[in-house]
Amino acid sequence: MRPRSLIQLIALALLWGSNYLWIAIALRTFSPVQIAALRLALGALTLLPVLLVGRRKIARGTRLWGQLIIAALLANAIPYSLFAFAERQVDSSIAGILTATTPMWTTVIAYAAGTQRHVRATSIAGLAAGLLGTALIFSPWQAAGTIASLGALTVLAAAVSYGASYVYMNHYLAHRQLDPLVLAASQLIAATGLLAVAVPFAGLQPLHPHPGAVLALITLGVFGTGLAYVVNYRLIASTGTTASVVTYLLPIVAIALGATLHQEHATLHALAGTAIILCAVALIRHTPGIPGHRTSPWAARRVVSPAQLGGIRRKIPWVTDVPESEGRLVNATGQSASYVRSPSSAITR
């Protein structure tokens, strides 16, 4: 990986991994619904100028916007709100750790929805290891433990919502040839609208502004939500690397920032559970056909023309049986990829 791409990878890990810390700090002033709504609005406002500079247009079509609203509900409105509610009770580091279970729930939901019909040994092993790691983090045998709480279960619910969104977007949005930044901006706009409806009912608490909380919320929205998508897009466009590597870095960043900047203390059980969950994620991500396999929630769209596909065939002799439609299929959501198959693996594009 080139130095520039490595810097982008580290930046993306810091941007996404620090979000849990910014939520914890923002809670000093804002309610969970206020945090989620303002985060989404700031993220959308950050992406809109990028679209204008690149002469891109917001998504169009009633049916597409209906699908985007559902995706925004599952991938943004629900989990962003749940994270903020959860961090009233659990540390930001625990929120980051438990979010790493998302690929597990994606796999389970994909099987339950029938989008993944073949049960592979690696999936079963990954799910078993993931459940073991999650149980170790919760440590239910420790009655006085703060991790086994409603807050931690709320984080898991957010991870399940993420998993459901990936399966939904893989089925309904992956086939659309949409620019990923257009998709991201449109989805954030839809999610902002959804939270705007909820604010009058759960987000009108009086504010007592704290400078640190305001700065944390701005950072969360502008950098952790808006700019992060731009960095992810550029990283994939330049190297083809998806955020699968970042998945392994997020809990580490969350733990490190929570300990150094928020005086949080991760238990040995939590650290051991984190290691097991990351191993489980590795097993699941190496199972072809699972939504999210070696991809990120916002992997870049790359249109492969027949001429380019011919070039791939010349460079890789065994690529002879890829239908043109498969070569054109591009991941607009990051949860399914256009790929060509080798005798032993799939290469995501």
Image (cartoon, rainbow, N blue to C red):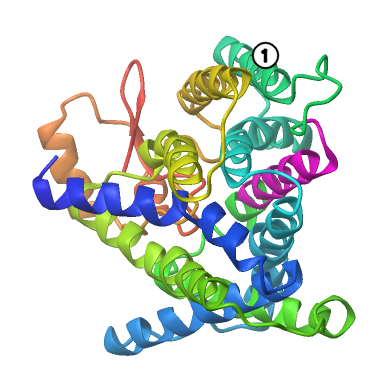
Side (left or right) of 142 relative to 249: right
Q: Position of residue 91 (x, y in %)?
A: 64, 44
Q: Secondary structure at mark 1?
A: helix
Name the residue rendered at 80%, 81% in the picture: 199
Residue placed most toward the observer, 14 or 247: 14
Q: Disc 1 marks which residue? A: 128
Q: Magenta region: which residues?
A: 148-166
- Residue 146 coordinates in the image, percent (x, y): 77, 33
Mark 1 closeness class: few <14, some 14–19, many ≥20 residues within 10 Å: some
Q: Which image quarter is the N terminus in?
A: top left
Tell me the quarter of the picture where residue 55 sits.
bottom left
**Relative vertical location of residue 278 with respect to residue 340 in this rendering, above or below:** above
Q: Residue at x 65, y 19 (%)?
A: 127
Kindly give the residue lying farthest to the right in the view shown. 201
Seen in the picture, residue 151 relative to 201 is either above or below; the reply is above
The dominant secondary structure in magenta is helix
Q: Residue 287 location in percent, x, y?
A: 50, 23
* Residue 310 at x, y percent in the picture: 18, 44
| Residue that appears at 74% across and 25% down | 138
Amino acid type of disc 1? Ala
Instruction: Say if 47 sits above or below 235 in the image.
Output: below
**Can you tell which quarter of the image residue 128 is in?**
top right
Residue at the image position 69 percent from the left and 74 percent from the top: 30
